[in-house]
Amino acid sequence: MNKKGEESTSSSIMEAGTTVISIMVVLLIIIPVALIIYGLIYKDTGVKNSFQDLTYEVDKVIKTGKPSMAALYLSDKYDLVAFTSQNLKSGRYDKPTQCGLDYCLAICKKGLVFVKDNCEPPIAHKRYQEIELIFDENDPVLVSGTKGIVNVDISQQDNKITIKKAA
């Protein structure tokens, strides 16, 4: 092969290499940015869906009077907390304004060590106007966040609902 052909081939290989490297650099920037954006938008979807399933089971117990069990997914950043109709505070959590003057279940975000826990706004919440939630007001965290799924027992006696971590 002549020198001109070798230079042309070398030049083509260099251009192809530069193009491949440029594409890889762009992908190394775009993929992490896209994952961060996805995480910010959908980070609490599993917890919210699981809470919705739990409140569906609570509503079913209210209608039928029959005890039930629900699987609740919580990450270690959240707690399932109950609030009374009167108190503005439940343990270490302030009652979310979205709960109004009703009994309320909420998914609250845990605070950092030595920083106040935050339930304003709650990740998810459900108000109960016609029924009382029974819980220990000194420890209103019904389920403390863990990594994974926790089974929760739901029962009703008269006009009162009890929700607690399954044994």
Image (spheres, rainbow, N blue to C red):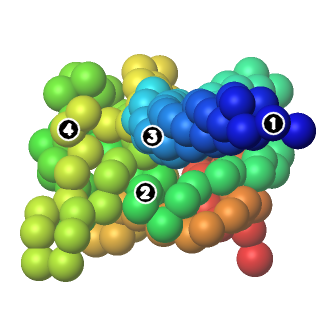
Distance between the Cα atoms at labels 1 and 3? 41 Å
Distance between the Cα atoms at labels 1 and 4? 75 Å
Residue at the far right in the pictured view? 1
Q: Which mark is residue 2?
A: 1
Circle 4 is placed at which residue position?
A: 120
Crowdedness near tag 4: few (<14), some (14–19) or many (≥20) residues, C-alpha within 10 Å:
some
Badge 2 amino acid: Tyr
* Residue 79 sits above or below residue 48 on the image: below
Please state which of residues 9 and 123 is positioned toward the viewer in this rendering. Answer: 9
Say what secondary structure mark 3 lies in: helix
Quarter of the view holding residue 106: top left
Crowdedness near tag 1: few (<14), some (14–19) or many (≥20) residues, C-alpha within 10 Å:
few
Q: Earlier in the sequence, mark 1 or mark 3?
A: 1
Distance between the Cα atoms at labels 3 and 4? 34 Å
Q: Are marks 1 and 4 in contact (CB under 8 Å)?
A: no
Q: Earlier in the sequence, mark 1 or mark 4?
A: 1
Q: Left or right: 135 with respect to 74?
A: left
Please state which of residues 141 and 4 is positioned toward the viewer in this rendering. Answer: 4
Q: Earlier in the sequence, mark 4 or mark 2?
A: 2
| Residue 145 in sight here | yes
Residue placed at 32% from the left, 37% from the top? Answer: 122
Circle 2 is placed at which residue position?
A: 78
* Residue 117 sits above or below residue 139 on the image: above
Query: Image quadrant for the N terminus?
Result: top right
Q: Left or right: 47 with respect to 155?
A: left
Distance between the Cα atoms at labels 4 and 2? 13 Å
Q: Which mark is residue 59?
A: none
Circle 3 is placed at which residue position?
A: 29
